[in-house]
Image: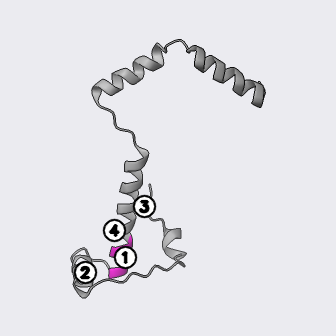
Amino acid sequence: MLTDMTNADVKTRDARLEARMTMNQKALLQHAATLSGRTLSEFVVASAQAAAARVIAEHETIRLSRAEQVAFVSALLKPRAPSARLRKAAAKYRKQMGP
């Protein structure tokens, strides 16, 4: 997972990130870092990495209601016959792109 750092990641940290913030924001982050027993940099990097992993997971996961799940599985198990328009589009595609 993205939030896991290996020893190789720690040893090869050669990229930098700079951020401008208010003194209050920095004090808040520093306080949280101190409470968690980390340096400010370690805390900020770990927190940003965890937030990034959450955002990516939210965008890569499809959540369906029970009714939507049933409709999806039903469509997979018993698909409707292709319409004339779809058959025509498929024939056109095969003609242009090859079999």
Residue 92 location, x and y as percent? Answer: 71, 24
The residue labelled by disc 2 is 25
The residue labelled by disc 3 is 4
Image point (36%, 84%), residue name: 20
Image point (33%, 27%), residue name: 68
Could you tell me the amino acid type at mark 4?
Ser
SS type, badge 4: helix
Q: Which mark is residue 47?
A: 4
First in sequence: mark 1 or mark 3? Answer: 3
Compare residues 7 and 15 and report the one nearer the observer.
Answer: 15
The residue labelled by disc 1 is 42
Image point (41%, 21%), residue name: 73
First in sequence: mark 2 or mark 1? Answer: 2
Determine the CA span between mark 1 and mark 3. 13 Å
Q: Up-down: is 53 above or below 85?
A: below
Q: Nearer the viewer, mark 4 or mark 1?
A: 4
Tags 3 and 2 touching, CB below 8 Å? no
